[in-house]
Image: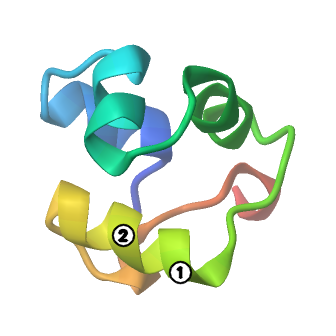
Amino acid sequence: MKFTLRELRARKNKTQVEVAKDLGISYQTYNAWEQDLSNVGISKVYALAEYFGVTIDQIKWEKNA
């Protein structure tokens, strides 16, 4: 099963600001990722997967939806 960043964040009951702070990035960067306005670098793909407790294959990027 695949999940968007928005779905993963909701499952963790976090705000965009909280996720950004936990990952050490700006809110604007995370917001752009979630809205599919910018690409996520490979190191952050792994960080997102670890943070949300999924594999990178389980993250559904909006462009691929």
Q: Residue at x 58, y 36 (%)?
A: 30
Looking at the image, residue 40 sits to the left or right of residue 9; the answer is right
- Whether residues under marks 2 and 1 lie with C-beta atoms below 8 angstroms apart, the answer is yes
Residue 23, relative to residue 54: is it above or below? above
Please name the residue that numbered disc 2 is placed on: 47
Q: Name the residue at the front extreme.
A: 24
Q: Amino acid at mark 1?
A: Ser
Task: Point out the image quarter for the C terminus.
Answer: bottom right
Crowding around mark 1 (Cα neighbors within 10 Å: few <14, some 14 to 19, many 20+) is few
The answer to whether any part of residue 44 appears in the image is yes
Residue 31 placement, left or right of 3: right
Looking at the picture, tell me which residue is in the foreground, 57 or 31.
31
Horizontal and vertical percent for residue 24?
40, 45
* 17 in relation to 21, above or below: above
At x 22% / y 71%, what residue is drawn? 50
In-front residue for pair 34/18 = 18
The reply, left or right, for residue 38 in relation to residue 26 is right
Considering only vertical position in the picture, is 50 above or below 29? below
Q: Is residue 32 above or below residue 15?
A: below
Q: Quadrant of residue 22?
A: top left
Using the image, tell me which numbered label, if any, was put on residue 43.
1
Is disc 1 placed on a helix, strand or loop?
helix
Q: Position of residue 28 (x, y in %)?
A: 68, 23
